[in-house]
Amino acid sequence: MHQDMKIMKANLNNMKTNLKVLLVLILLINFNQKSFSKDEKKDGIITLTVEPNDSLFVVNATVTDAATKAPLKGVEITFLIKRMYGDLKVGNATTDASGIVSASFSSKMPGSDTLGNINLNAKVEDNDVINDITVSKVIPSKVSFEAHTPVPPGMISATAPVWLKVTFWLIVGTVWGLFGYVTFLIYQISREKRKPQTAPSK
């Protein structure tokens, strides 16, 4: 029996050792794969040109290898225009064998700032060919931007309409009034309990 226990302990120790070796091998394999995939990616260069016409802005992007200047195929580019509350996506496509991709958006797009400029970004993220990159280009807009246009009062504006203000304060006043009334009733009940109880006269 004692001999069997020794054998079992030895087997457990061997299993633990094998598991440790296996974990180390898995970590090394994952590290090598990440390093290899990282080394496979290249640094790219994106060149943007814009061809305006009556109804559209046509954007052409050319992607080349930063080292060899050779065109890169299979690079997905997302085109974004900066707006007040974020970026507006206007297109995305993948480069062809010549490393070229095109997108278009309406020429009636208002500017991104008070100067009437459209801020266009061409972005590459999580691509298997090149590392992440973002290139920007400023395009004069054909639509004027009103710098100080008054915003009418609304539910989500900084200045609420009068009826909304009155309603809000009525609700607040009613709530506080009920709270005060309930507090007064509680005070009256506690006061009555504190009064000495007189025995009824016979």
Image (tube, helix red, strand yellow):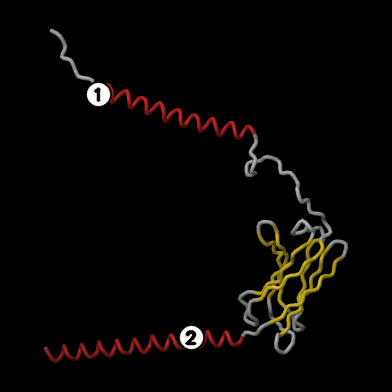
Query: Where residue 10 sits: x, y (%)?
Result: 22, 91
Q: Residue at x 17, y 90 (%)?
A: 6
Q: Residue at x 28, y 26 (%)?
A: 190
Badge 1 crowding class, 10 Å Cα cut-off, few under 14, some 14 to 19, many 20 or more, is few
Q: Amino acid at mark 2?
A: Phe
Quarter holding residue 50: bottom right
Q: Nearer the viewer, residue 175 or 78?
A: 175
In space, the residues marked 2 and 1 are separated at their CA atoms by 77 Å
* Vertical arrangement, residue 71 with respect to residue 150, above or below: below
Q: Secondary structure at mark 1?
A: helix
Between tags 2 and 1, which lies in front? 1
Res 49 label:
none
Instruction: Answer with left or right where residue 43 lies relative to residue 184.
Output: right
- The C terminus appears in which quarter of the rendering? top left
Res 31 label:
2
Query: Where residue 81 sits: x, y (%)?
Result: 72, 63
What residue did someone put label 1 on? 193
Q: Secondary structure at mark 2?
A: helix
* Vertical arrangement, residue 198 with respect to residue 134, above or below: above
Q: Amino acid at mark 1?
A: Lys
- The N terminus appears in which quarter of the rendering? bottom left
How many numbered marks have been drawn onto this rendered protein structure? 2
Query: Where residue 83 sits: x, y (%)?
Result: 70, 59
Residue extending farthest to the top is: 202
Quarter holding residue 119: bottom right
